Image (tube, helix red, strand yellow):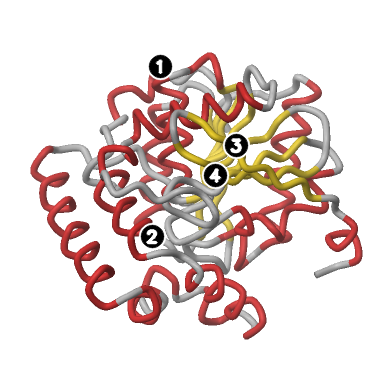
Amino acid sequence: MTDAEAETVLIHHAVTVRGVRMAVTEAGSGDALLCLHGFTGNWETWWPLLAPLAQERRLIMPDLLGHGQSDAPRDPARYAAPEAVLDLCAILDALGVGAAEVLGYSMGGRLALSLACFHPQRVRALILESASPGLRTEAERAERRAADEALADRIEADGVAAFVAYWEQLPLFAGIRRLPSSIQDKVRTIRLRQRAAGLAGSLRGMGTGHQPSWWDALAQVNVPVLLITGQEDEKFTRIAREMHAALPMSRVVTVDHAGHTVHLEQPEAFRDVVQLFLAERAMGTQKGRG
């Protein structure tokens, strides 16, 4: 951690919204940037970005339902995208924010896009890292739901530690395995602090197979969208290019020498891209497609 990161003032809230307790961390001031982590993460996902972005924005970083210090309800339906976006709206209301720019990674990116589609008035711009609009067909969604159900059962039967040992060896996270041990240890620690019930509930309610498909809705997303992927993550780079073709005001950036977790694998490049996008937004020079 740099001196600037160490000096970043963090404010931790416990916000009760719609019958659940959500942990929310804030840093900085100014226009709101809502930051949504991925599966097995929490607000600390964004620690590489805290110092620079907190100089320019009010970062609002919730632990999503079932993750971190937020509640982990037993009912999978409580994690579903329509419920999750209502939770985000309630958090923004509780913090006095009408609309925000929204940054989401992986699962958090899918949720950010869902927020823009369900409640467009709450979203001023989108930054989607390694994200997708969901699966196109019901057959694909059914297959994914079955796989997520099996994985949820496995987490509940074997426990979080066994799941993390399996999860961190997936090809999707090969880039993390090349990082210094200190960063790998931090990611592992965040994952190990999760609860089996929360991860299983998130898979059963918020997994890709349960999410609405937003492919046909992309043309109606009328805010600037920045799509970021790692060059080594071929699947999500292809998805980003397809999204870019459908979105009216989008820009796609592919970062070299990075896979699925661009913000960890190439943090300086990721920060530069995000900061440029936000600066252009602030100056009103966003040119739309690029």
* Side of 138 relative to 31 (left or right): left
Secondary element at tag 3: strand
Name the N-terminal-most of marks 3 and 1: 3
Q: Which residue is mark 2?
A: 234
Upstream in sequence: badge 1 or badge 4: 4
Pointer 2 or 3: first along the chain: 3
Q: Nearer the viewer, mark 1 or mark 4?
A: 4
Depth check, mark 4 against mark 3: the one in front is 3
- The residue beneath circle 1 is 220
Q: CA distance from mark 2 to mark 4?
A: 23 Å
Label 2 vs label 3, nearer the camera = 3
Q: Which residue is mark 4?
A: 36
What residue appears at the point 59 percent right and 34 percent down from the top-left corner?
102
Helix or strand or loop: what does disc 2 sit on? Answer: helix
Q: How far is the residue under mark 1 from the one under mark 4?
A: 22 Å
Q: Amino acid at mark 3?
A: Val
Q: Pointers 1 and 4 in contact (CB under 8 A)? A: no
Name the residue that disc number 3 marks.
15
Q: Mark 4 or 3 closer to N-term?
A: 3
